[in-house]
Image (tube, coloured by chain):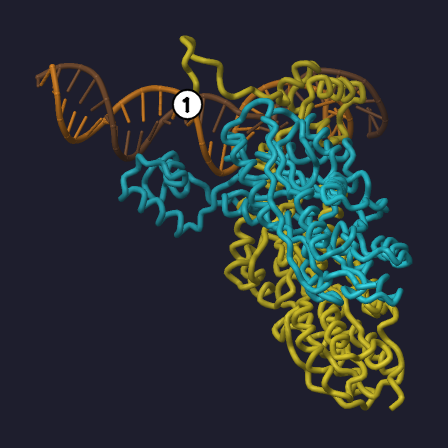
Chain colours: A cyan, B yellow, C brown, D orange
Amino acid sequence: MASKKPAADGLPAAPARPRLTVMRDVAKLAGVSHQTVSRVLNNHPNVRDETRQRVLDAMRSLNYRRNLAARTLVTRQSDTLGIIGFETTLFGPASMLYGIESAARDAGYMVSIASVRDLDRRQVLEAVDRLTQHSVDGVIAIAPKQSVNHALAQAPPSLQCVAVGGAGESDAAPTVSIDNAAGARLATQHLLDLGHATVHHAAGPPDWPESAERIDGWRSTLYAAGAVVPPVEHGWWDAESGHAQGSALAKDPNVTAIFCANDRIALGVLRALHEAGKRVPEDVSVVGFDDMPDSGFFVPPLTTVHQDFAELGRRSLALLLEHMAAPTDPPPPHRVLLTPQLVIRTSSGPPPHP
Amino acid sequence: MASKKPAADGLPAAPARPRLTVMRDVAKLAGVSHQTVSRVLNNHPNVRDETRQRVLDAMRSLNYRRNLAARTLVTRQSDTLGIIGFETTLFGPASMLYGIESAARDAGYMVSIASVRDLDRRQVLEAVDRLTQHSVDGVIAIAPKQSVNHALAQAPPSLQCVAVGGAGESDAAPTVSIDNAAGARLATQHLLDLGHATVHHAAGPPDWPESAERIDGWRSTLYAAGAVVPPVEHGWWDAESGHAQGSALAKDPNVTAIFCANDRIALGVLRALHEAGKRVPEDVSVVGFDDMPDSGFFVPPLTTVHQDFAELGRRSLALLLEHMAAPTDPPPPHRVLLTPQLVIRTSSGPPPHP
DNA sequence: TTCAGCTCTGTGAACGTTAACACGCGCGCC
DNA sequence: GGCGCGCGTGTTAACGTTCACAGAGCTGAA
């Protein structure tokens, strides 16, 4: 078994620490003080061009890399942001994560991620704790449930937090999200405009604000048009749930239009309809929400409400940076709403003539 | 414009630095030296129980949190792992990311992520650089292309790297991936066993090892069975590409079975077949690869090869940790292969009787 | 000429932790 | 009784940066 410290030779053995190149080394080679090197590194203006160049050359020739840990120790900022992730294997959250990360990189930040299995207060707080311990400069929570905002309110006040995607009126952290109600209105109105007497809804889980807001938008549009408001069935965000809801709806001959809380539910509804021998859109129209990558290739191609997840990520980062630059102790309740867009494909059409 | 340093009052102003509680404070309260506090924190055995308890109490009452930056500075390890992510909005990579992150958390590591837009050497190296600068202890690259391994070989040798998902025989980093060839064999043999004379293949991009390995598995199975090997068409990994390939294949009456390089391609193929008036599986059988979340709700439910992405993540973390514990300078070429499983649903069946 | 005020540079002290060593004590062993 | 040894603890010195100053040299106005 090879020894970890091979001090076999007579000498006291080389130190296990490889001695990495530091500012002092660069300084010595460039014939300046370490402080001058630091100034060059931080783009301090008061450095003679000629000096700066010498330092730069020295850095290059020594392949110097600044030690961020030391920097963090003294400046107390790490150029790292924390993300609290939830269900990040799903397309939406994964896209937000990516959007945030790319935006953060452009802004010179690294991103650390802390996933939570559930959005209860304890787990979120524990995630915040892990992140603070690693001294992140701010936190973005992918937070589709209200409980996260409550938890965020208990985070150390010095830590700036922003919630993204979902959650309604926030008491604690500033929030950026899609205007779910507007999206639902778009979808519902589109179906009404096509001539459907009313629109049924295959909803998401009842305790998710995203789901609730979509229901609100759908219902209010129906009210405004004087259409009857059918009862809603709740389910999970997946195709299985959509299939179950769709099978039930397929039995009702009055159902000519179904607005689904997301594209996966729509996929399940589509299959249920197919199994029941109903044609889409001739017999029943279906509209989704999200505009997932391949929803244009469902059978038939899905009319849906497009969300710009990447933009969501960018905006949330921008908001966080803004709050970090001008910290106000209780963050002003602030909500950025992005407007979704309807993408019309072929799963929606006029109702059948009876 | 509000000044950042409001030293407006007569006094020299309170220091902007809030003075956080440090080991010394805990030590003072507990009546010990800071070193003893450190020992307690690191579970050093040589601390009297009574002392340890006093320190623990002091830490709690002061709400002490150790400063990881300082620790990293001296120990040169950060308890942080880096992930190089690619296309992490897709289900596969997103799941791996999640698998790695949860496993890392259980092992006491934080995870930082560096996404790349393309897998060329420059970008990967740049990502490695960003990660090393933030002093990660190791790197896992979600690396479905060979170029990544080449890039990894140029990373600082002190940095342990592992590649996950894809890439064939690796010269540089140890790799863990699915046995793509075995999966393809499973799918192809399944179709052959159903009685199809041969199996067509809707492939992925030609320069991806995952794609190549699946082609190999498919082709070798056909050879072994003495079946004709149809030419392969290449495409991207999405439904649009599948639709294009499927449309072409639908014109050929000899095509009775199609093995698709992934489920998204299969989705496109399914629609193309539907448009061409071919029934699945009565006229043509279709098999996918990946077992994406909703592929059981395609029309018809898709027979496919299941990959356990989460397990992939866990295994890659385990491998990385192992290599970190026993560093050998050129890492031994090592490849862990996970066996995929065939999930039979209804998109595959016996060929039509002519 | 002097002196204020700028530009450029250097010196010393943090920052909060762990590593290395030293010390005192009690124990068992010759 | 001396010696070695392990245990529990403290003291001091890193680790590699940035910050707060100080000082040298130059310019320009009084």
| Vertical comparison of B26 with B247: above or below | above
Q: Quadrant of the N terminus of chain B?
A: top left
Position of B10 with respect to A249 (left or right) is left
| Location of residue A172 in the rendering, given as x and y in whole percent from the top left corner | 66, 28
* Residue B322 point in image, percent of width and height: 72, 53
List the residue tagged with mark 1.
Answer: B3
Classify mark 1: helix, strand or loop.
loop
Horizontal side of A275 relative to B139 (left or right) equals right
Residue A122 place in picture, x, y as percent: 78, 31
Q: Is residue A16 visible?
A: no
Residue A40 visible to an observer of this rendering: yes
Q: Residue at x 67, y 30 (%)?
A: A170
Q: Residue C16, percent across and down? A: 59, 26
Q: Which residue is more in the foreground, B261 or B26?
A: B261
Q: Residue furthest top?
A: B10
The residue sitting at 85% across, 79% down in the picture is: B191
Instruction: Answer few, some or many: residues within 10 Å of disc 1's Cα (few below 14, many 20 plus, some between 14 and 19).
Output: few
- The relative height of residue B300 versus residue B139 in the rendered view (above or below) is below
Q: Quadrant of residue B37?
A: top right
Q: Subunit of mark 1?
A: B
Which residue is situated farthest in the front direction here?
Answer: A354
Residue A50 picture quarter = top left
Q: Amino acid at mark 1?
A: Ser
| Quarter the C terminus of chain B occupies | bottom right
Q: Is residue B295 left or right of residue B115?
A: right
Quick one: A286 or B147, which is closer to the camera? A286
Which of A179 and B17 lies nearest the eye of the viewer? A179
